[in-house]
Amino acid sequence: MRPQQNKKMIAGLVSAVGAAVLALCLLAAGAVAAPNPGPGSDGPQSANVPYVAWVGEHVRLVVCDPAITTGDEAQVANYQVEDWSGYQSQPPTPDGDSGSSIGQIFDPGPAAFFRSSEPAHRIGESDEQEGCVATDYKSLNPGLTRIRVDIRNEGTGAIVFSHQFLVIWLTANKPTLAEAVTVHHGHMPEITLTSPTTATGIWALHDEIVWPDGTRMQGDGHYHETYEVVEGKWLIASSTLTRLRMDLTGPAS
């Protein structure tokens, strides 16, 4: 390839969403499943990469943002299971007695709020850190779920921050997507040479997974990538997936 400064080029992209999810499934799991780190420094908070756990495990859902406070401005967190692909009568349950059905709101209380200590959550150039909120969910059945958290001002009730989590619970004896049909598309690459041996690229993404019972997950977003020449070949140096939307629909009636 002849390098041309600030010239766009088209490169091939090979990706398999089934293999990616399977790789996540092979991660060692403890008593409380840790959040999937995802690409980049902010993990699933910016990319909405699914959390993955075994059936029966707790998954800790954590999100941080400058709008979340732990000081004088009182806030409340409302968690809600929006969609669930498993048994509709047994959706994932939070770490508490409330919110045990789809659409029911669960409030983990003030103990859910804390201040982040991670460098990625520093606010600007100051020493102040973003506020965070966390709670645990578990499921006794396999399936995919979308869980929303709304952070509200306790006095006015206004939503100051909202985030969606995507969580997958798998059975230990069948942790693959072999029974599902998966589709993964990369479109309209915008790739710019930044030097004779480095480049950056943005790819539009659409992916979809369809299970035999009609459960369907589909989403759209972008890959943000960097490339470099190694031993005369262009290779992907980094790749970050950011989501614009993620839809999950239950089994066909």
Image (cartoon, grey):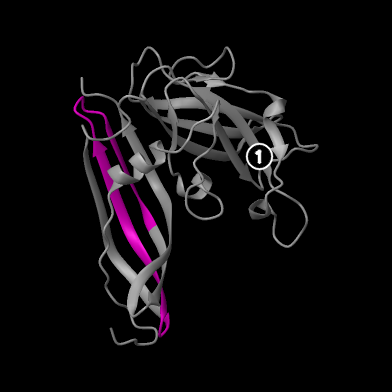
Query: In the picture shown, does residue 35 fall above or below 170?
Result: below
Q: Residue at x 56, y 54 (%)?
A: 41
- Quadrant of image for the N terminus: bottom left
Query: In the picture shown, does residue 85 fall above or below 38?
Result: above
- The overriding secondary structure of the stretch rendered in magenta is strand
For the image shown, how many numbered marks are present on the structure? 1
On screen, residue 114 versus residue 252, left or right, reads right
Q: Secondary structure beneath disc 1?
A: strand
Seen from the viewer's position, the closer of residues 84 and 74 is 84
Any magenta on residue 206?
yes
Any magenta on residue 145?
no
Please, what is the three-letter code of the amino acid marked with disc 1?
Answer: Cys
Query: In the picture shown, does residue 100 fall above or below 70?
Result: above
Q: Residue at x 42, y 22 (%)?
A: 55
Residue 175, image x, y percentages: 33, 31
Residue 37, image x, y percentages: 51, 45
- Residue projecting furthest to the right: 72
Residue 239, image x, y percentages: 42, 60
* Magenta-tinted stretch: 194-222
Seen from the viewer's position, the closer of residues 177 and 70 is 177
Query: Which residue lies under the disc numbered 1?
Result: 132
Residue 110, image x, y percentages: 71, 26
On screen, residue 91 versus residue 85, left or right, reads right
Q: Residue at x 49, y 41 (%)?
A: 36
